[in-house]
Image: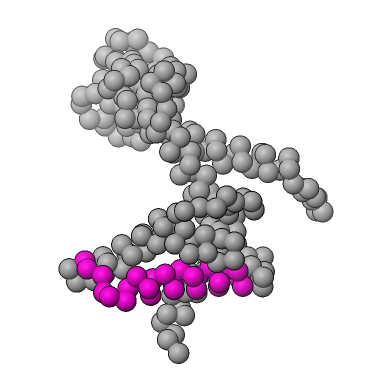
């Protein structure tokens, strides 16, 4: 018996079961000319077949398929469908924690990929509207030039971000600096820990122009839509499902 093949099939079944069981096609299907084979009433699409062939070819020296590769790949795809059917009959998706986790991951990945595809087709108008609404995401952070007297930890010269000041002097110093105007100073701390910080110059944060920030805007929009897609699915699923909680929270 070819145990390496069985092991490979076992690994495939977990992932394939996750995708099929959750993201399966509707029960009623129109006949398709794209199928290369049918297992019961489920088609094996030509795209899946071609992808599998491409994967096999990439492992071959020179990238060429052998004479029997096409028949062998198709048989393996059919085997996979049969194994998935049996796994569902046995309820492996309900009993096996690893498969359950794979199912959750597969569903999230499916929702995210679909949302990313939709986000990639966003109109210029909607993208600019997102940029306006989420302006805080695309702002350059304020920078400061400061001088410190009496502090144990010196500050480097030049422009500093608030997080750089915080790392050396703590959050109190950052809050004070943010309140100062250029030329003003403030005392921080008490006793031996008391020191003076003077704001020499500041550059307030400003929004990056849309064209300059476009790549970041597109990435933020895609991420926002992906997160929203998962939330919206779960909200809808809760409304459609009888969820009963038997323990105190």
Q: Can residue 62 be seen in the rendering of this structure?
A: yes
Rendered residue at 38%/75% (across/down): 72
Most extreme residue toward the left is 62
| Horizontal and vertical percent position of residue 147 | 26, 21
Most extreme residue toward the bottom is 1
Q: Quadrant of the N terminus?
A: bottom left
In the image, residue 58 above or below residue 108: below
Q: Quadrant of residue 213?
A: top left
Rendered residue at 26%/14% (across/down): 201
Q: Quadrant of residue 50?
A: bottom left
| Horizontal and vertical percent position of residue 79 | 50, 73
Front-most of 146 and 235?
235
Rendered residue at 29%/9% (across/down): 183
Look at the image and say whether residue 204 sits in the magenta stretch.
no
In the image, residue 158 above or below residue 111: above
The range drawn in magenta is: 63-87
Q: Is residue 152 left or right of residue 10?
A: left
In the image, residue 126 above or below residue 239: above
Q: Is residue 221 left or right of residue 142?
A: right
Q: Can residue 143 be seen in the rendering of this structure?
A: no
| Horizontal and vertical percent position of residue 190 | 44, 26
Front-most of 166 and 96?
96
Q: Is residue 217 left or right of residue 146?
A: right
Question: Could you tell me what secondary structure mostly forms the magenta stretch?
Answer: helix
Rendered residue at 58%/54% (across/down): 24
| Horizontal and vertical percent position of residue 249 | 77, 48
Front-most of 62 and 232?
62
């Amino acid at each position: 018996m070819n145990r390496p093949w069985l092991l490979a099939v076992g690994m495939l079944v977990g992932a394939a079961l996750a995708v099929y069981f959750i993201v399966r096609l509707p029960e009623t299907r129109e006949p398709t000319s794209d199928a290369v084979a049918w297992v019961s009433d489920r088609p094996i699409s030509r795209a899946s077949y071609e992808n599998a062939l491409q994967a096999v070819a990439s492992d071959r020296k020179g990238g060429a398929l052998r004479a029997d590769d096409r028949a062998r790949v198709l048989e393996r795809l059919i085997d996979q469908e049969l194994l998935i059917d049996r796994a569902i009959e046995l309820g492996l998706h309900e009993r096996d924690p690893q498969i359950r986790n794979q199912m959750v991951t597969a569903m999230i990945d499916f929702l995210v990929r679909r949302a990313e595809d939709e986000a990639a087709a966003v109109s210029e108008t909607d993208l600019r509207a997102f940029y306006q609404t989420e302006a805080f995401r695309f702002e350059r952070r304020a920078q400061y030039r400061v001088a410190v007297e009496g502090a144990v930890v010196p500050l480097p010269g030049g422009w500093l971000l608030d997080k750089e000041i915080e790392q050396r002097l703590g959050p109190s110093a950052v809050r004070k600096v943010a309140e100062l105007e250029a030329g003003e100073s403030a005392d921080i701390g008490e006793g031996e820990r008391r020191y003076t910080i003077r704001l020499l110059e500041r550059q307030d944060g400003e929004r990056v122009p849309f064209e300059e920030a476009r790549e970041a805007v597109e990435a933020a929009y895609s991420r926002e839509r992906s997160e929203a897609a998962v939330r919206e699915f779960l909200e809808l699923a809760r409304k459609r499902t009888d969820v009963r909680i038997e323990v105190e929270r």
